[in-house]
Image: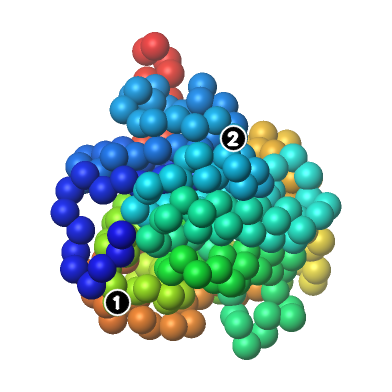
Amino acid sequence: MITTDRWSLDVELLVTGATGYVGGQLVPRLLAEGHTVRCLVRDAEGLPAPWRDRVRVVTGTVEDEGAVLRAADGADAAYFLVHGLEHRIGGLLEREVRAAASFRDGVEAGGVGRVIYLGGLVDEEDIARTSPHLYARQQAGQTLRDGPVPVTELRAGIVLGAGSSSFQLLRTAASTPVTVRARLTRSLTQPIAEADLLELLVAVLDDPRVTWQILDVGGPEVLTYGELVARVREAGGAAPALSVPVPYLPPEIVASGAVLLSRLDPTLVLPLLRSAEEDAVVHDGLARELYPDLGTTSVDEAIAAALAEVQRQRDAAVAG
């Protein structure tokens, strides 16, 4: 269990959300560190083949406290990386809180020593104005902290990585010949490189300094969404776009176009775009103070790495 000392190798870890983007990248990192990993998933076939046979798989959902208990029993720590944006927007807050409560009670019964939760960047002093999506994430974190198991919450904005839905939306916006200047494009964002986020998720695992802490995490640069799209466009070699000012552009209209171009799930796109109407920046410097060497990858470096991985995946698909 959690102590004031750093853990040795071969720690038992539970990862939920392992079929998703961040979880799917995190599990092989944990395995490489020498840890034993369990995954609670709806469908084991959704786990990436390269490491599927190296983890213990428990079939179930985080909403099922019994399934969580079966997966968590005897684990040292657990990652909560799931969210309720699957196939429908209505009832998001209720789903997020219910899932967090079931997970909280299941890991408590299983004797887990620490929970690590990945949420979204929010301004606690202006929480009433935050988007429904980010408010639900904030409430899920609060629900986890209502239990006795110590929680470390990392809050991140846009993750710059090939499998990130937010990055896919950026690529979609960067591929169009026309860009708009609207409220959404003027909002501030502090994106983080995929590699940096994964490093931080591993670093906090056995660090007693971050028990019961909320850590805002982001990269070294703050820029507008419009500037970020321009960086992606430039990195991809696209010609400059025609910029058109628009007094107000409803997220629903943007989402409709983004869904057609990106083929992403519309129930995911709209909440992401609504969240993009507000600033998503680091409000607390604790993470930078504790981990000064992490989260330092520049936006341009992160974009280049993500685009290179997108190309690698395309080449592999063609070859295979």
Compared with residue 248, is residue 36 higher up or lower down, i.e. above or below?
A: above
> Which circle marks residue 117 in the picture?
none
Q: Quadrant of residue 295?
A: bottom left
Of 8 and 157, which appears nearest the observer? 8
Reply above or below: 281 against 261: below
Q: Position of residue 1 (x, y in %)?
A: 31, 59
Image quarter of the C terminus: top left
Residue placed furthest toward the top? 320
The first of marks 1 and 2 along the sequence is 2
Residue placed under numbered mark 2 in the picture: 60
Between 204 and 169, the one nearer to me in the picture: 204
Q: How far separated are the C-alphas under marks 1 and 2? A: 32 Å
- Residue 172 position in % (x across, y down): 59, 44
In front here: 122 or 245? 122
Check disc 2 and report its element: helix, strand or loop: loop
The residue carrying mark 1 is 209
- The amino acid type, in three-letter code, at marker 2 is Gly
Query: Of the residues shown, which amino acid type is indicated by label 1?
Result: Arg
Q: Nearer the viewer, mark 1 or mark 2?
A: 2
Residue 160 in the figure: left or right of residue 138 = left
- Identify the residue shown where x is 38% and y is 47%: 74
Which structural element holds mark 1?
A: helix
Name above or below for residue 72 compared with residue 92.
Answer: above
Q: Along the line of sight, which residue is nearer the eye, 34 or 179?
A: 34
